[in-house]
Image (cartoon, helix red, strand yellow):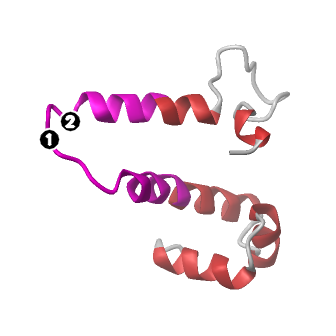
Amino acid sequence: MSDSSQSTLPPSGINDTRDQKTLRDSVEDALHNYFQHLEGQDVTDVYNMVLSEVEAPLLESVMNYVKGNQTRASEVLGLNRGTLRKKLKQYGLL
C-alpha cells in the first residue's frame, strides 16, 4: 500500500484524531479478529474476500464524495472510467 493508507480517517481538522486508527490498523484488527474466530475451520480465498469487503464501501464512499460523478470518481480513485463502471455494477452500485 502507499503512504496514503497511513492517514487517519476522517481528515484532520474535522475531529480530534488522537484516538483514531489508521485504515491499515483497522484492517489489521479486523483480520486478526477474523482469524481468531475461525475456531480451526479451513479458510481459502482470503485475499478476494478482503478486497470485496474493502472495495465496495470504498467505491460507495467515493461516489458519495463526488456526488455520483463517475468521471470525477475515476480520477479520485485512479481508475479508468470503464473499470469504475464495471466495479460499480459488480457491487450493485450502478
**Does residue 32 appear to the left or right of 42 in the view shown?**
right
Q: Which residues are magenta?
A: 29-55
Residue 56 % position (x, y): 52, 61
Query: Is residue 32 highlighted in magenta?
Result: yes
Report the residue at 75% width, 33% height from top: 7
**Most foreground residue, 8 or 80:** 80
Residue 18 % position (x, y): 72, 14
Query: Is residue 1 highlighted in magenta?
Result: no
Report the residue at 82% width, 69% height from top: 75
Residue 89 % position (x, y): 51, 80
Quadrant location of the C terminus?
bottom right
Give the numbered dot on residue 52.
none
**Does residue 90 appear to the left or right of 11 in the view shown?**
left
> Under tag 1, what secondary structure?
loop
Q: Residue furthest top?
A: 18
CB-based contact (under 8 Å), mark 2 and mark 1: yes
* Other-residue count near label 1 (Cα within 10 Å), few / some / many at <14 / 14–19 / ≥20: few
Task: Classify 82 as above or below 93.
Answer: below
* Tag 1 residue: 41
**Does residue 67 appear to the left or right of 89 in the view shown?**
right
* Tag 2 residue: 38
Q: Residue furthest bottom?
A: 82
Which amino acid, by three-letter code, is at mark 2?
Leu
> Under tag 2, what secondary structure?
loop
